[in-house]
Image (cartoon, helix red, strand yellow):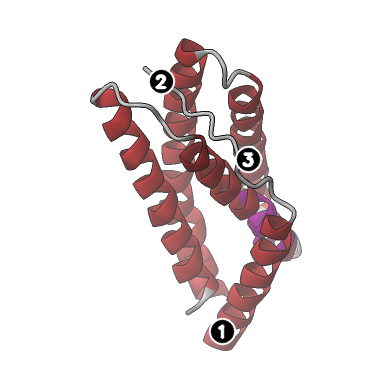
Amino acid sequence: MDIVELIKDDHKTVDGLFQEINSLVDNREPIPDELLITLITELSSHLEAEEKVLYARLKEEKGFTELMEEGVEEHSEISQLIDEIQNHRDSLEAVADKLNDLQDQVEHHVEVEESETLPKVKSLWAAEFLEQLAEEMKDAKRDIQSGAPSPSHQERDIHY
């Protein structure tokens, strides 16, 4: 697996988590705290690892400045929304609104990344290097997630 495939797999994982949350909200069922933590952990570790591994390498390449600036700005906006969700988890309406905003922002980022950035990355470097970057990103995500918050023993589901 190369880094392009790994990033696309991460995108699918996050999309699946959003679908699961949306289904719960649509059915007015509680969102388990563990599900929110999983979404936040997946998103946060992906963003950070992507910047540390892929973006750091792309900064050295010509023709990627604008895409990298846009990507970093989008990552920052996504991180801000994640912080807002974490800070307002007791307010049901605020969480629902912020989750919608977060999903919209993530979907936009994924669209740009998969249609513009990743095809250029795939043609920029040799397959072996792309595979090496995937391993580096997996390691970075693992390191980041090892410091991620874990669900408390007292579950605090969000009810609608």
Q: Marks 2/1: CA distance?
A: 49 Å
Callout 2, which amino acid?
Answer: His
Residue indicated by mark 3:
152
Residue indicated by mark 1:
126
Residue at left 53%, top 13%? 91
Residue indicated by mark 2:
159
Q: Is any part of residue 61 visible from this angle? A: no
The front one of 91 and 96 is: 91
**Above/below status of 99 relative to 13:** above
Q: Residues within 10 Å of mark 2 (few under 14, many from 20)?
A: some
The front one of 34 and 50 is: 34
Camera-side mark, 3 or 1: 3
**Above/below status of 40 relative to 61:** above
Instruction: Name the quadrant containing residue 82.
Output: top right
Q: Marks 3/2: CA distance?
A: 17 Å
How many numbered marks does the figure carry? 3
| Magenta-colored segment: predominant secondary structure | helix
In the image, farthest residue toward the left: 27
Q: Are marks 3 and 1 in contact (CB under 8 Å)?
A: no
Residue 48: where, in percent of width, then height?
69, 52
